[in-house]
Image: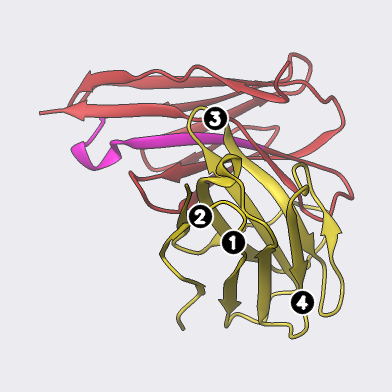
Chain colours: A red, B yellow
């Protein structure tokens, strides 16, 4: 079983749509959680951290459910520029900040 | 600031050849990492370093060696390249900080093909 599992997609949605991505992680000792964004043939970049209380950054909302070991990302009012692969990432406590990546969910926003 | 840079950007090797990938960061970060990314598998950690002169193995270290002689540089070596090492290699760096995880900054990647 992969440590971090994501639905690979692809998700093809029209502009303005709301889309949600889910992610599950297997290690209950996971400490920190993130969503990274990776554009085609580019490097990953941090989109947002995910906190237990949930957090929002503009059109993006991230949620964490530690009991179910589940992370989600909601994108509202999708833009063409949101087209990318979204990587779910977790790290263990005291693990020298080693990130464990999911394989990513591909999103294409259509005009 | 250039951030994290990697050289070369592309390379084609023959089986058995050796090469070194260079990563440099100008953000004074303590931690540096080497990952490989293969289709459908996400990024996997090869080796990492928590400071100048230190290195440690990650998830997939076999066939690779690393060195961190200077804080700003992290080198990844392939002593005898194999086709299974065809991949995109990313270097990353981050601050040493408190209990929360912190952002890793990635270089643009090196696309390596081993024939």
Q: Is residue A90 magenta?
A: no
Q: Which residue is mark 2?
A: B14
Q: Nearer the viewer, mark 3 or mark 2?
A: 2
Instruction: Relative to A98, say whether B13 is above or below.
Output: below
Q: Which residue is mark 4?
A: B68
Distance CA(mark 1)–CA(mark 2): 6 Å
Discs 1 and 2 share one subunit: yes
Instruction: Relative to B32, say whether A99 is above or below.
Output: above
- Asked if labels 2 and 1 touch by Cβ distance under 8 angstroms, the answer is yes
Q: Which residue is mark 1?
A: B17
Distance CA(mark 3)–CA(mark 2): 28 Å
Left or right: residue B111 versus residue A96 is left
Of the pair A11 and A2, the residue shown nearer to us: A2
For the record, the magenta segment spans A76-89
Distance CA(mark 3)–CA(mark 4): 28 Å
Discs 3 and 4 share one subunit: no
Q: Find residue A82 and report its horizontal and vertical position in percent.
A: 29, 38
Of the pair A17 and B83, the residue shown nearer to us: B83
Distance CA(mark 4)–CA(mark 1): 22 Å
> Under tag 1, what secondary structure?
loop
Can I make out residue A76 in this image?
no
Q: Residues within 10 Å of mark 3 (few under 14, many from 20)?
A: many
Label whose residue precedes the other's in the sequence (2 or 4): 2
**The quarter of the displayed image where residue B2 is located:** bottom left
Discs 3 and 2 share one subunit: no
Q: Which mark is residue A71?
A: none
Can I make out residue A62 in this image?
yes
Q: Residues within 10 Å of mark 2 (few under 14, many from 20)?
A: few
* Residue positioned most to the left: A111
Left or right: residue A15 versus residue B77 is left
Q: Nearer the viewer, mark 3 or mark 4?
A: 4
Q: Nearer the viewer, mark 4 or mark 1?
A: 1
């Amino acid at each position: 079983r992969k440590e971090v599992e994501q639905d690979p997609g692809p998700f093809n949605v029209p502009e303005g749509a709301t889309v949600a991505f889910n992610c599950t992680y297997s290690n209950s000792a996971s400490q920190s959680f993130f969503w990274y964004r990776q554009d085609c043939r580019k490097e990953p970049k941090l989109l947002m951290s995910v906190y237990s209380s949930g957090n929002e950054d503009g059109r993006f909302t991230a949620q964490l459910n530690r009991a179910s070991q589940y992370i989600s990302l909601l994108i509202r009012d999708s833009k063409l520029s949101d087209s990318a692969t979204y990587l779910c990432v977790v790290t263990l406590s005291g693990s020298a900040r080693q990130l464990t990546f999911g394989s990513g969910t591909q999103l294409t926003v259509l005009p | 600031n250039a951030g994290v840079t990697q050289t070369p950007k592309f390379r084609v090797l023959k089986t058995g050849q050796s090469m070194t990938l260079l990563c440099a960061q100008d953000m004074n970060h303590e931690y540096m990492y080497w990952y490989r990314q293969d289709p459908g598998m996400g990024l996997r950690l090869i080796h990492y370093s928590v400071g100048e002169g230190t290195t440690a193995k990650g998830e997939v270290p076999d066939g690779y060696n690393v060195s961190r002689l200077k804080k700003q540089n992290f080198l990844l070596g392939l002593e005898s390249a194999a086709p299974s090492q065809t991949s995109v290699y990313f270097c990353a760096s981050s601050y040493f900080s408190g209990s929360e995880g912190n952002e890793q900054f990635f270089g643009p990647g090196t696309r390596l093909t081993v024939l």
